[in-house]
Each structure stands twice: as C-alpha cells, then as structure tokens.
Amino acid sequence: MVYALCALLISFETACAQYVRYLSLEEREATRPPRGHVDFCAREPYECAPVGGPTSIRVDTTTYMLIESAHEIVRRIVVPTSDLKSRGTQEYWGAKIKDSAIEGDCEDFALLVRGVLAERGIPKTAMRIIVVRDEDGEGHAVLAIVAQSGRILISDIKKDKIVDWYTLPYKWEKWTSGRNPRKWVKISDPRKRQ
C-alpha cells in the first residue's frame, strides 16, 4: 500500500520521506568496474573525472518533469542496437551515430540521458550508472537519479517513463560512485535481506 501511494506521488520527497530509508538501495563495499566502463573512461576521461557537487538533488515537480523529458528525448533518438551488431564487439560503452540515427544499447542510453540531464543542470554527482541482472538474468544497465530524500529514479531503455527502482524486477548489483565515476560500489535491495 505504501509503495503504491508513493509511486503515484510526483512530489515524493516531502509526502513519503518517512518511508524512504526502506525504499533506498543500500551501498556495500567497493567493487571492480565493468570492463566496458573502464574502456569508456580511457576514451572519454572527462566523462569519468572526479567532481565536486551534491550526491543527491531535490526532486520537485519541475525537476521530475525535466528528468522525464530527458528520458523521452533520448528514447526517441536512440535505435536500440546491441554492441555486437553496431560495433562488432561484445561490450562497448558509447553510442554510435549511423545514418543520422543513434545506435546504442542499455548503457549507451544511460550515458546519453546522463549527458542531457547534465546539460540541463542536474549534477553528475547525483546520477549513477547501475549494473543489474534483468528478469532473464542478463546483464543490463540503467541510470539512477538520486533524490535528497533517498528516492532513486531510474531511466531505463526498456521503459517508456521514469520509474522508481523498487518497481523493477531486477537484481541490483553495483553502481558508480557519486563523487568519482571511475569507482564502483556494490549495492543491494534492502527488501532482500537474509
């Protein structure tokens, strides 16, 4: 009941703040970054440079609409394409422009949404790339936007709209550090504590 009510509220931060601790992913210990991310950072060091800034943002109606808009824009311009098909390699982080279209898979989508949001003033420190296992057990990446309340909004190439993390059937594995995108941290779902 609490989840359903909170999911319906755009201004979640003030209305549901007392429930947020349960709804937030939990950080664990440092872990190794995905190989594709290491290669991406070597090619695009400015995208992975440690930066200062807030590791979360206030999400009001205006900010939510801005996040939703960025998600929708990128969904319209990206043609979902596997790295194997577009790049000829198993894993390559970075979209490819081909015939006036942008080809990319899940992590490319997440990076593009992150870029659009950064251009619109959302600090990169409040956004994380998350690696998950999807409902089929396959590796998948999404973008997380972390709210001051602890709410975690997800931009996922598989979804038409922004969603709260806990609505997805994923196994949450690791995400980038807010302060240093080269560093990765294991995360877990607090609902699955042993």
Image (tube, rainbow, N blue to C red):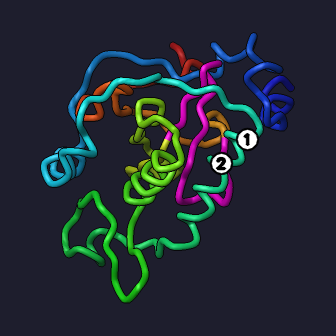
Tell me the crowding category of disc 1: few under 14, some 14 to 19, or many 20 or more residues within 10 angstroms, Cα based: few
* Mark-to-mark CA distance, 2 and 1: 6 Å
The N terminus sits in image quarter? top right
Q: Is residue 162 magenta?
A: yes
| Image point (67%, 31%), residue name | 59
Read off the magenta span: 144-163
Q: Position of residue 131 (x, y in %)?
A: 39, 41
Q: Residue 189 at x, y = what percent?
A: 53, 24
Side of 164 where 83 appears, left or right: left
Residue under pointer 1: 62
* Residue shown at 22% from the left, 64% from the top: 90
Does the stretch in magenta take in 101? no
In terms of secondary structure, what is the magenta stretch mainly? loop
Q: Residue furthest left?
A: 42
Towards the viewer: 51 or 153: 51
Measured from the top left, where is residue 75 in percent x and y?
Answer: 56, 66
Question: Is mark 2 in CB contact (under 8 Å) with mark 1?
Answer: yes
Residue name at image x 46 percent, y 36 percent: 127
Position of 6 relative to 16 (above/below): below
Q: Position of residue 20 (x, y in %)?
A: 68, 17
Side of 76 where 105 appears, left or right? left
- Residue that numbered label 2 is attached to: 66
SS of the residue at dot 2?
helix
Residue type, label 2: Leu
Q: Amino acid at mark 1?
A: Thr
Q: Residue at x 73, y 41 (%)?
A: 62
Query: Around disc 2, counting alpha carbons within 10 Å, would you say few (fewer than 14), some (14 to 19), or many (20 or more)?
Result: some
The furthest residue to the bottom = 99
